[in-house]
Amino acid sequence: MVVIETPRLILRTWQPGDLAEIVRTTNTEAVMVHLGGVASPQDCRALFERIQASQRENGFCFWLVERREDRARLGLCGFKRGTVDPVLGALEIGWRFRQDVWGQGYAREAASACLDWAWRNVADNRIVAITVEANRASWGLMERLGMRRNPALDFEHPNYAPDHPCCPHITYELARPL
């Protein structure tokens, strides 16, 4: 089911055959460096199950992103409910794109469309995004989307050991437009 269309992209719900392609193209050292490293097959399957559950339960998830012109699967972008303090329960936007399409504006186009969708379809008054400080590309996109860092919400991610480079997380947020 198509959820969002932009001039170059289609964001849609996942189909069973999508997982293998996304794992092949986005579960790489370069893409996963700020996400804890290459995920195991079990972790990839668990992510897919969480995505499907979120779509069923919330009406949103990290949707599959396809390029309109050739239907190539580029990555994922969308929302989940925050799972750790201090963003627990907050509407959290996120994205992951395969390396060969970085720098072409796809992430910004998809994330902007997702924000527009959220303000029309979800009652939350703010949207958050989290990343590690070293992930300049991600927090740079957050800033280009109009999000602002809130240092009071920075935290140590409980999924990582205190000395792991992915442990310290920074938080950006965006208030509902008036």
Image (cartoon, helix red, strand yellow):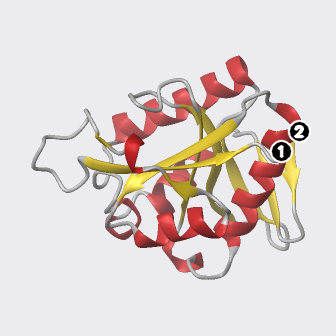
Taking 170 as reference, is 40 above or below it? above
Residue at the spot 36% in from the left edge and 59% down from the top edge: 32
- Asked if marks 2 and 1 touch (Cβ < 8 Å), the reply is yes
Q: CA distance from mark 2 to mark 1?
A: 5 Å
Q: Tell whether 118 sits left or right of 77.
A: right
Q: Tell whether 49 sits left or right of 34.
A: right
SS under mark 2: helix
Taking 67 as reference, is 81 above or below it? above
Does the rendering let one see residue 133?
yes
**Amino acid type of the residue that numbered disc 2 sits on in the rendered structure:** Arg
User: Circle 1: is it few (<14), some (14-19), or many (20+) Cα within 10 Å?
Assistant: some
Residue at the spot 71% in from the left edge and 22% down from the top edge: 58
Residue at the spot 64% in from the left edge and 70% down from the top edge: 144
Residue at the spot 63% in from the left edge and 26% down from the top edge: 54
Taking 106 as reference, is 142 above or below it? above
Q: Quadrant of the C terminus?
A: top right
Q: Nearer the viewer, residue 35 or 92?
A: 92
Q: Nearer the viewer, residue 61 or 93?
A: 93
Q: Nearer the viewer, residue 72 or 140?
A: 140
Does the rendering let one see residue 1?
no
Q: Quadrant of the N terminus?
A: top right
Taking 5 as reference, is 109 above or below it? below
Q: Tell whether 164 sits left or right of 127.
A: left
Residue 46 image offset from top left, x and y in percent? 44, 30
Residue 71 occupies which quadrant of the picture? bottom right
**Amino acid type of the residue that numbered disc 1 sits on in the rendered structure:** Trp
Residue 138 image offset from top left, x and y in percent? 49, 65
**Which residue in the structure is indicated by mark 1?**
117
SS under mark 1: helix
Q: Nearer the viewer, residue 158 or 43?
A: 158
**Which residue in the structure is indicated by mark 2?**
120
